[in-house]
Amino acid sequence: METITVVTTQDEDSYVSHCLEYDIASQGSTREEAIDNIQEAVSLFLECASPAEVQDRLARRGRIDKLSLHRA
């Protein structure tokens, strides 16, 4: 089992989920549907992509950092 990072945002009339590790996005009319769809999209990518493509996407992924800001 692999854990992925997904960011889900709400547009005007839908939700968009983006997998940060593989740079794959999907959408749905609800947050739950968007998350289900991104899980399916990433699973299909991993089933169909060559090992080189998977490694290339992992190599290009960014890094997530949490920063503390001091506000005046």
Image (cartoon, rainbow, N blue to C red):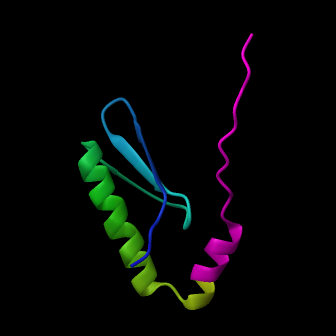
Q: Judge whether residue 9 is colored magenta.
A: no
Report whether 62 appears left or right of 11.
right
Question: What residue sits 30% from the left and 33% below the top?
Answer: 13
Question: What residue sits 41% from the left and 70% below the top?
Answer: 42
- Looking at this view, is 15 or 67 the one in front? 67
Q: Tell me if residue 10 comes above or below residue 23 in the rendering.
A: above
Report whether 51 appears left or right of 39.
right
Q: Tell me if residue 41 comes above or below residue 71 in the rendering.
A: below
Q: Judge whether residue 56 is colored magenta.
A: yes
Q: Residue farthest to the bottom?
A: 51
The residue stretch that appears in magenta? 54-72
- Looking at this view, is 6 or 47 the one in front? 6
Question: What residue sits 47% from the left and 65% below the top?
Answer: 4
Considering the image in quadrants, where does the C terminus appear?
A: top right
Q: Tell me if residue 18 comes above or below residue 14 in the rendering.
A: below
Report whether 49 appears left or right of 47.
right
Q: How many marks?
A: 0
